[in-house]
Amino acid sequence: MISTLIIAEAGVNHNGSEELAIKLVDAAIDAGVDIIKFQTFKADELVTSEAKQADYQIKNTEKTESQWSMLKGLELSFDSHMSIKKYCDSRNIEYLSTAFDSLSLKFLTETMNLTRLKIPSGEITNAPFVLEHALTGCDIILSTGMSTLPEIEFALAVIAYGLINRTEKLAPSRDAFFQAYKSKEGQKQLKEKVTLLHCTTEYPAPFNQVNLKAMDLMADTFDLPIGYSDHTAGISVSLAAVAREACVIEKHFTLDRNMQGPDHKASIEPDELKALVAGIREVEVSLGKAVKIASSCEEKNKAIARKSIIAKKDIRKGEVLTENNLMIKRPGTGISPNQYYEILGRKALDNFKPEQLIRIESV
């Protein structure tokens, strides 16, 4: 059995504080997750000075300001990211971070030497940036919030092109992308390197707009590993996604939902993160195999829970067995009631008293 990869998305819930980020690492370790993920960006490289906040950001921060101003306050320095990763390494938890600009991506891959990258939903239509990720040769987790199947396919085509043209540097174009995507080597690289995450990009995401069945559609369409990036309240949808065999679960978490910031209110707290990890591990072991047999723990209960054919009244040896002198009761240590209609009309082997298990000549 392959364990679900659990990513605790700290994101920007450190509020720009390295000290708070370290506390988030400790909470993630305590919960038992596999990876803690942050976000690496330079506000000046990410948004224009006039870009507006999303509605959920205004609601959650209770403050209206430009995206630049909000993000500037949430920005961690590259030195802080290096310190956080060093701490993660010392505590044996994988550090992961999403890059939102080329400078940050180069830092994560060339300075931090990450071998796994996460492309966020908002960048899936940013072909040049997607290509930059692919050209690193790193494993890629691609989040698909807000996307259609054609948009996902195009992003995969760009990634396939990047993965198989890292040395040849062929001129990028739509035709070149899809030529790579349709090639045997391109598909091989995608299967080895890429995991897709279903996602609903809203914070929190309404339950009636989650559409987990899209995971099945994506798996059938692209034949790639499928996970789920969960923005809903609570942990139930993540557990449902694991029951649908999500190979990755990503979930935002915070130390305190009442803290100031855009993502805290749509995040779970440490106790919920622990419950999520425990629940995922329970669900994944309960999935078992696609067989229907009695489990080993059930075998001892067959005789107790099932029934047998018994005598309803005194029966003499050689007497014909009929509906009038037979009945069915527990325990299940005698002849199965499934054979009831086969033994009607046969003769008793012995004398039987009421409620005694029946024996017959042969069935």
Image (cartoon, helix red, strand yellow):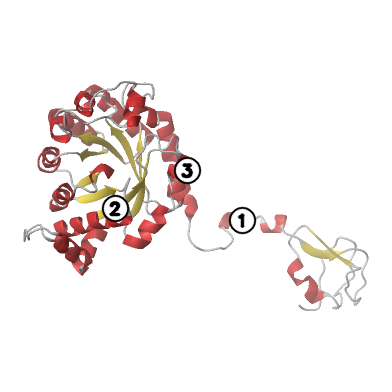
Secondary structure type for disc 1: helix
Q: Nearer the viewer, mark 1 or mark 2?
A: 2
Q: Nearer the viewer, mark 3 or mark 2?
A: 3
Q: Which disc is residue 208 wearing?
A: 3
**Left or right of residue 279, residue 170 in this image:** left
Q: Amino acid at mark 1?
A: Glu
**Left or right of residue 81, residue 298 in this image:** right
Task: Return the residue nearer the eye: 85 or 157.
Answer: 157
On the question of residue 335 being in view, the answer is no
Q: Classify 10 Å Cα crowding around label 1: few (below 14), some (14-19), many (20 and above).
A: few
Whole-angstrom CA distance, mark 1 to mark 3, is 38 Å
Which residue is outermost to the front? 50
- Tell me the residue that label 2 is attached to: 195
Vertical placement of residue 315 versus 71, above or below: below
Q: Amino acid at mark 3?
A: Asn
- Estimate the x, y position of residue 175 in percent, counting from the top left: 16, 63
Secondary structure type for disc 2: strand
Q: Nearer the viewer, mark 1 or mark 3?
A: 3
Tell me which numbered mark, 1 or 3, is placed earlier along the sequence.
3
Q: Classify 10 Å Cα crowding around label 2: few (below 14), some (14-19), many (20 and above).
A: some
- Estimate the x, y position of residue 84 in percent, counting from the top left: 20, 30
- Residue 173, by quadrant, is bottom left
- Tell me the residue that label 1 is attached to: 298
**Badges 3 and 2: C-beta atoms under 8 Å apart?**
no
Residue at 76 percent across and 66 percent down: it is 337
- Residue 234, by quadrant, is top left
User: For the N terminus, which image quadrant?
Assistant: bottom left
**Badges 1 and 3: C-beta atoms under 8 Å apart?**
no
Whole-angstrom CA distance, mark 3 to mark 2, is 25 Å
Q: Which disc is residue 64 wearing?
A: none
